[in-house]
Amino acid sequence: MFRWLLPQLDGLEAQNKLLMIGAETAGEPIGLIVMELEREHANVHCLFVAKSSRRQGIAAGMMRAAKAYCLAGGLSFIQFAYYANKSATAAIEAWLHKEGWSTPRVEAVVFHIDSSIASAPWLRDRPLPHRLRMQRWSETGQHERDQLSEGGRLAYPAFLSPFKAFAPLEEASSLCLLSASGIEGWVMAYRVAEHTILYDAVFVAAQYQRFGLAFVMLAKSILLQLEVGIPYGMFTVNASTPDMMKLARQWIAPYACKTNEKKSSFHKLK
């Protein structure tokens, strides 16, 4: 987990978004919680207890301390996300139930691909509508980014934010869509393992959605991924975007080597 999380800690701390709570015994670390603090809630990125110290209430104790800190900071809830069909899933869900968290729900479906997706007929460059252009997100000016982050132009859900910091941004495959007015869309890719990219957020402004630009950008991003020799990709499609889910099941699922569900649970603080 820390292969992708550790490089982000300094940046989160600089933004006052980092909360880390640990546990130790006899001077030896035995547990850790890492959270990212947002405006109204906190996301649990890591909850770990050493195997020899489990079933002793250590995770619950660290979480109580985290809840107290978040409540004092005015946050409303804590979110815990995890993947189904993993070896730890049953233990995670039993712990959440015991601690009074909400019933887990499917937050997203994750489609896994390998280099065989190169045979997909839709994987090709396509022309953009007049007055639109595509470029790397890293080449976007600070003014355009500030305008977007301040909410001045586009309204987008938090789970599609291009400003997440949970893993290193894969600059080669992270793209944005631009008009004369500014940023109109993006596809954000993160390097979560040496040979794996996670496509976490694909968004297009409402007035351009009828052109199918989400998949135009996604296809370009995948082509760039394959071009630099990264063989594996993961696509996270949120359950609250039924149109995107329908497209993903139609166009990505046939070329996916596997799929799994990302679930989430919440704990209200006030």
Image (tube, helix red, strand yellow):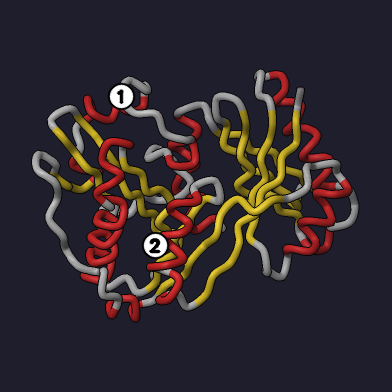
Quick one: SS at disc 2?
A: strand
Q: Quadrant of residue 99?
A: top right
Residue lying at 18% horizontally and 42% vertically, measured from the top left: 139
Label 1 crowding class (10 Å Cα cut-off): few <14, some 14-19, many 20+? some
Residue lying at 13% horizontally and 44% vertically, measured from the top left: 133
Do the CB atoms of the residues marked 2 and 1 lie less than 8 Å apart? no
Q: Nearer the viewer, residue 183 or 144?
A: 183
User: Amino acid type of disc 1?
Assistant: Arg
Rendered position, 65 above or below 122: above
Q: Residue 93's spot in the image, x, y percent?
A: 79, 56
Rendered position, 179 above or below 228: above
Q: Residue 115's spot in the image, x, y percent?
A: 33, 78
Q: Which residue is mark 2?
A: 197
Total count of labels: 2
Quick one: SS at disc 1?
A: loop
Q: Which residue is mark 1?
A: 153
Q: Residue 246's spot in the image, x, y percent?
A: 46, 59
Residue lying at 77% horizontally and 39% vertically, measured from the top left: 63
Q: Earlier in the sequence, mark 2 or mark 1?
A: 1
User: Amino acid type of disc 2?
Assistant: Ile
Outermost residue to the left = 130
Comparing labels 2 and 1, the label whose residue is closer to the camera: 1
